Amino acid sequence: MAGAQAVIDIDINDAEIKAALKKLVAKLNDLRPFFNDVGETLLNSTRNRFRTQTAPDGTAWAALSPAYRARKPRHKDKPLTLSGVLRGTLTKQADKDSLRIGTPLIYGATHQFGRGAIPARPFLGLSAEDRNDLLDALNDYLAQ
């Protein structure tokens, strides 16, 4: 993810996932193939949040303020969607010991965490379904 960017770290504080990743590291030493595979699934899930207008925990994103909604030229009922640029810049980056899913756009952090009058509308992170998909993928890799 080159260029100006805000690095948004979402730590996975899940003991079961961490334990399985540790086993996989011991087995493979380079998690890049695993992260490339699972990264596509997680990237699609993240993109889907723009369609469902929900955070990873399933809560709906905060509605647009009436003032912004009145002046917004299109997609008046869709937070984080004016022209689709933010969603369109979502990428994954895998290396031997990490997976990053994010955007190179600086304002991504503002929308993820909120700032001032802009409420947080989290789009990055693991949903319960993502967690299950990740654990299934880990178990599949460990079984190979």
Image (tube, rainbow, N blue to C red):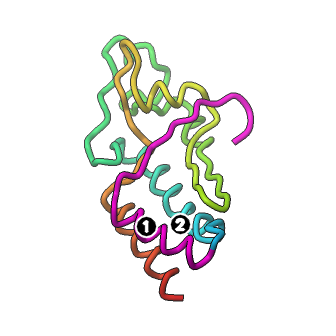
For residue 16, above or below residue 141: above
Q: Is residue 98 magenta?
A: no
Q: Position of residue 41 (x, y in %)?
A: 51, 63
Q: Secondary structure at mark 2?
A: helix
Residue 67 location, quadrant? top left
Residue annotated with mark 2: 38
Q: Position of residue 103 (x, y in %)?
A: 59, 39
| Circle 2: residue type | Val
Per the model, the C-alpha gap separating discs 1 and 2 is: 7 Å
Residue occupying image coordinates x 33% and y 61%: 15
Residue occupying image coordinates x 48% and y 74%: 23
Front residue of this view, candidates 76 and 97: 97
Front residue of this view, candidates 61 and 9: 9
Front residue of this view, candidates 59 and 102: 102
Mark before the other along the chain sequence, 1 or 2: 2
Residue occupying image coordinates x 27% and y 39%: 60
Q: Position of residue 56 (x, y in %)?
A: 35, 48
Q: Which residues are magenta?
A: 1-28
Pointer 1 with pointer 2, Cβ within 8 A: yes
| Circle 1: residue type | Leu
Q: Position of residue 85 (x, y in %)?
A: 60, 35
